Amino acid sequence: MSPVVTVTRSELEDRRRALLDELGLSLEDFAALAETRTLTGHEFDVKEELDEIAFLLGE
């Protein structure tokens, strides 16, 4: 059986903020960047994780 990982809403929001701070962008700026050009490998990984966080937060 796989282990269950439990995270709080606050932890998810903190992780999202840390990912965006690492890129030096706001969520809106990153979304605009993703719409206007091809993302680097790292940026794509960040986008995937941000999408997962948004899903878990019910956004």
Image (spheres, helix red, strand yellow):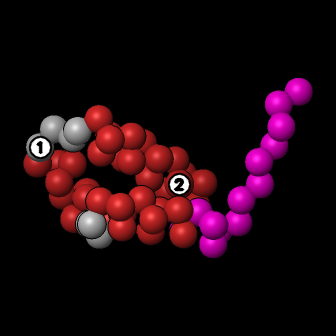
Residue linked to disc 2: 53
Give the side of residue 38 with respect to residue 18, left or right. left
Give the image location of residue 32, x and y in percent. 18, 58
Q: Which amino acid type corresponds to the residue marked 1 in the rendered image?
A: Arg
Name the main secondary structure of what is drawn in magenta.
loop
Q: 47 or 23, which lies in front?
A: 23
Residue linked to disc 1: 37
Q: Which amino acid type corresponds to the residue marked 2 in the rendered image?
A: Ile
Q: Is residue 45 above or below residue 29?
A: above
Q: Is residue 9 magenta?
A: yes
Q: 3 or 23, which lies in front?
A: 23
Q: Is residue 20 above or below residue 4?
A: below
Marking on residue 51: none
Residue at 23% in and 38% down: 40
Rendered image quadrant of residue 9? bottom right
Give the image location of residue 39, x and y in percent. 21, 41
Say whether residue 50 is visible.
Answer: yes
Q: Which residues are magenta?
A: 1-13
Residue at 30% in and 45% down: 43
